[in-house]
Amino acid sequence: MSTMLRTISPVDGRVYVERPLAVHSQIEAVLERAAKAAAGWAAIPLETRLEILGKAIDHLVAAGAQIAPEITWQMGRPVSQTPGEVRGLEERARYMLAQASTALSPLDPGPKTGFIRSVKRVPLGVVAVVAPWNYPYLTAVNAIIPALAAGNAVICKHSHQTPLVADRFQAALDAAGLPPGTFQHLDLSHADTARLIGDARVNHVCFTGSVAGGHAVVEALGGGFATAGLELGGKDPAYVRADANLAHAIENIADGIFFNSGQSCCGIERVYVHETLFDSFVEGVVDLARTYRLGDPTDPATNLGPMVRASAADFVRAQVAEALAGGARALIDPKTFERDARARPTWRPRC
């Protein structure tokens, strides 16, 4: 079993990040610090917690010019699109912080004769966040900010494809004044991730990833009593009705199919079109697809980047071959998307 994390960039196939995976003593130390930090963080007034987290978001946004190309080099999304994830990160985080006071306030279940009743919201303790690479900031912030706002300590294990994201969260939260041990991150093997999830000091797990990964998380939870929230891959359909705005449908469904090279939790994988619009819809999507430029994702003119790994591209090629063998027709010549002559010489297309 490898003891090193190696992030292979889909941009040029080189090792972009390399570092040792955490060993048992480091994992144990992180768990101990998190368990101790959780009580102190929970005792801090909510308003103060929200102020610290707001400052952390300020730091992340200020680093946006560095973060955007890092995303590109780690997972391949064109640099013309990665700044949008930084904007989305800020939008989501600001919204969650604005709603926190209301969301975390006690509930009044209503009057009952002879009783004074209320439901108080209290932190769980230690929350483990296991985040994926495809939207590395948006998926992570969805768990990290609510967990910290609610008074929990967080241990983040980010994807081996996007480890710098966890580094960025750590730096921003530290700079904002988050108490030591309240947020920590680990680079872990699959086996050690399972041990972390099953540790009695972990009270809740937030996992975003594949269905197979979700099964592994549930299995790891069996050794303890932690709760879990799982956001797993879907098989999302789109339906174009007879009365649809055809141009709008073509533009938005094509974007849902091709954005992030189709590597989205909610990427559109099936399209059902009313028979009266079918031919026009297919023609429109094909025409739009031909306008995409596949190339070096660090080139601002590129809007279709490589898939994250060569194996992922091979999987899609196999799906296309299976469809063609089953009677499907190829409407776009692959030569349309051969390497652009203007792409950088070091870039080797993987999709």
Image (cartoon, grey):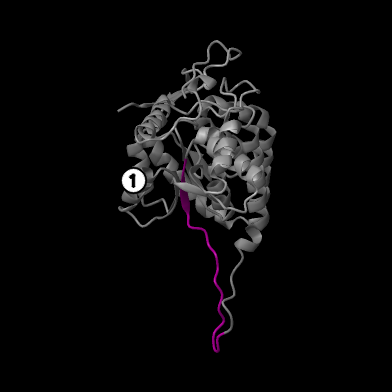
Determine the residue positioned at 65% across, 48% down. Answer: 245
Picture coordinates of residue 317, whole percent (x, y): 40, 28
Q: 326 and 205: which one is in front?
A: 326
Q: Residues within 10 Å of mark 1 (few under 14, many from 20)?
A: some
Image position of 219 (left or right of 289): left
Q: 223 and 86: which one is in front?
A: 86
Residue 140 included in the magenta stretch of the image: no
Count numbered badges in the picture: 1
Image position of 251 (left or right of 132): right
The residue furthest bottom is: 113
Image height check: is 111 above or below 228? below
Determine the residue positioned at 63% across, 40% down. Answer: 251
Q: Which stretch is magenta?
A: 112-131
**Helix, strand or loop for the magenta stretch, by majority:** loop
Q: 101 and 265: which one is in front?
A: 265
For label 1, the residue is: 216
Picture coordinates of residue 293, whole percent (x, y): 59, 24
Image height check: is 45 above or below 173? below
Displayed quadrant of residue 86:
top right
Residue 118 included in the magenta stretch of the image: yes
- The quarter of the picture where the N terminus appears is top left
Image position of 209 (left or right of 57): left
Asked whether the viewer can see residue 180, the reply is: no
Determine the residue positioned at 56% across, 23% down. Answer: 294
Q: What's the residue type where badge 1 is placed?
A: Ala
Q: Secondary structure at mark 1?
A: helix
Asked whether the viewer can see residue 113, the reply is: yes
Picture coordinates of residue 58, whole percent (x, y): 69, 40
Picture coordinates of residue 280, whole percent (x, y): 58, 40
Q: 276 and 123: which one is in front?
A: 276
